Image: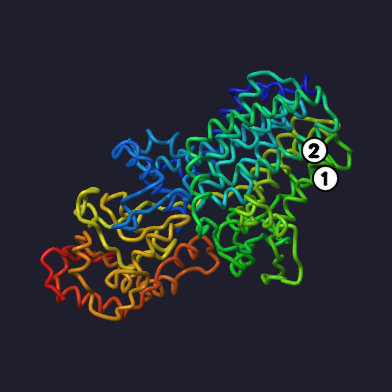
Amino acid sequence: MQDTPAGSRAERFLRRTPLVALIYLGLAVAMTWPLAADFAGSVPAGAGDLWQNYWNFWWWKTALLEMGQHPYYCPLIFFPTGGKLIFHTHSAFNMLVALPITATLGPAAAYNFCILLALWLSGFGMYLLLRELTAEARGAFLGGLVFAFFPQTMEQIFEHLNLITLQFIPLTMFFFIRLTRRGGVRNLAGTGICFALNALCGWHLGLKLTLVLLPLAILHLARPVRPRRVLLRDWTLAGLLALLFMLPLLAPVVVEMASVEDDYYRKPPQNLGVEAPYVFVPHYGHPLWGGAVSAAYVDRPYAAPGYVCYLGFVPLALGLWALLRRKSGSVYWSLFVLGAIVIALGRHPFWGGEVVESITLPFYLLEQLPVFDLMRVANRFMILASVGLAVLTGLGWSAIRKKADWRFAVLACAILFEYSWWPYPTRRVETSPVYEQLIGGADDGAIFNIPSNQRSRSGHNLVAQTVHGRAINGGYVSTSAPRAQAFIDSHPALADLDGIPKLEGPVDTAALNRLGFEFVVIHKSRLNSYRDRILATADRNDIVLTRTQSRLGDMPDEIYERLRNELSASCGDPRFEDDAIVVFSLNGCSTQ
């Protein structure tokens, strides 16, 4: 068998772009199986932000198709003031591209569609980029595997849709490289549109892609293949086109940032970096050795997805080989990966699960830059590391002298095996059947959930709203405008029940009813006794399950008993009840 690209069967086969696209689609389904088996009924096994993203699909469908209004304001949360969603994590591209699916099959199907779309196009986009950079299809295919199924990306699927829809990063780079080398209207349009779509997946992704393109632009200006003024002209036009596409959704954000005095969009800083040794620790979901390494993740400093930063020994070996063989571009991309990992370590590094505050890392400098300081979660810079590692993987293959097809097959299978998370953890979307009896709309009485307004712990209230459709108190959004909380604090009946009820006085059912609330729903599944019962039988090394269960609880049983007794005395027997919730009607309650 010849080892030249022209004589390789695999090389010829992988130059058939439509077939490669189909392969990546099949791999996206396989690597997340059994998600596709229950497409409209199950979602990834997340617990907090998962439900926020799930609700987003429902809200965009409700706002655009039913209420005919802009999704940046929702009157159905934080009732009666409503919730301003300008700084909420919408991931507008996903909401719009999946809108027909949301309207016909529901939020779960829309969520799963966007996951598969992201993984599919991430692999295919990186394949196109590496075909452009190396002119070899087999190495390009390997790089696509690395980028699409990078372990941190697979973990982020549990919670953060906006952090896994990365497909437009390599696609933008693909058109940018072609624009830089050859120019052309198609490449200019591709660069601008793909950059805009990337930003519409998540504003922070636009900033991260900027950090990829800026050094590339400087590099090409230092060694231009076309006149510098032409390059600057083309890049500027592509940037203006991107701005034009983003403007309808970006303009309200910029106006709000400029107009508010309290900068409420700035969240408190968090030191959520990765831990350096963990770039060599396999992820805890691996079907073969996941159980052996899960103990290393149990006591990690924070439970949120993003701590996994495993690079993979096969991609690392290929990247090192590219560097040793002095493959063109290997030094640049090696430094790029190293720099991204250093930034991902955070403001202060973790070591042995503890923060070393005596050491300050480059992420601190990034926090001092206007606009870029909004990228407050350091571990998310592993996204850039995955970009560089994928490119190095492709370069590593191109540096191999004898590129036999069997070697390619072994490497492709090794990467997929090393990155596999199978079966992928999923959960059924289940709500109390009682909500079916409460179905209403924006003009019907609102539902007062207890407990509520507890950030990610309140995500189940949003899921319930996708069933009953009524307005609710509280909510869980990325950044809440102070007005809603100020209204709660100014009304004793609301303030006394906010978060975990304080019950400093009797429940003022009359005041709640006057504000427009028709039902009170107490969530029995949020009792501390309920959580403790489940955790007592849980496998502590099951990271996914324990993270989900830890979101339960947070309401003392004695508070529940007092609430139930007071509402029963004032409003009579519960209107509905099952094992998860108990519902009281406020209509006809005796005055306090």
Q: Looking at the image, do the residues carrying marks 1 and 2 touch, with CB atoms under 8 Å apart?
A: yes
Q: Quadrant of the N terminus?
A: top right
- Residue 275 position in % (x across, y down): 69, 62
For residue 347, which quarter of the picture?
Answer: bottom right
Amino acid at pointer 2: Gly
Q: Is residue 434 left or right of residue 184?
A: left
Q: CA distance from mark 1 to mark 2?
A: 7 Å
Taking the image as drawn, is residue 498 in sight? yes
Q: Secondary structure at mark 1?
A: helix
Q: Earlier in the sequence, mark 1 or mark 2?
A: 1
Taking the image as drawn, is residue 423 in sight? no
Seen at 78% across and 19% down, the residue is: 6
Q: Is residue 32 left or right of residue 368?
A: left
In front here: 48 or 546?
48
Count neighbours of disc 1 (C-alpha within 10 A) and say few if under 14, some if 14 to 19, many if 20 or more.
some
In front here: 523 or 120?
523
Seen at 74% across and 56% down, the residue is: 342
- Residue 74 position in % (x across, y down): 35, 49
Q: Secondary structure at mark 2?
A: helix
- Residue 372 position in % (x across, y down): 64, 50
Seen at 75% across and 30% down, the residue is: 405
Question: For residue 396, which numbered disc appears in the image?
Answer: 2
Count neighbours of disc 2 (C-alpha within 10 A) and say few if under 14, some if 14 to 19, many if 20 or more.
many
> Is residue 496 shown above or below 456?
below
Q: Quadrant of the C terminus?
A: bottom left
> Which residue is disc 1 drawn over?
320
Seen at 39% across and 49% down, the residue is: 55
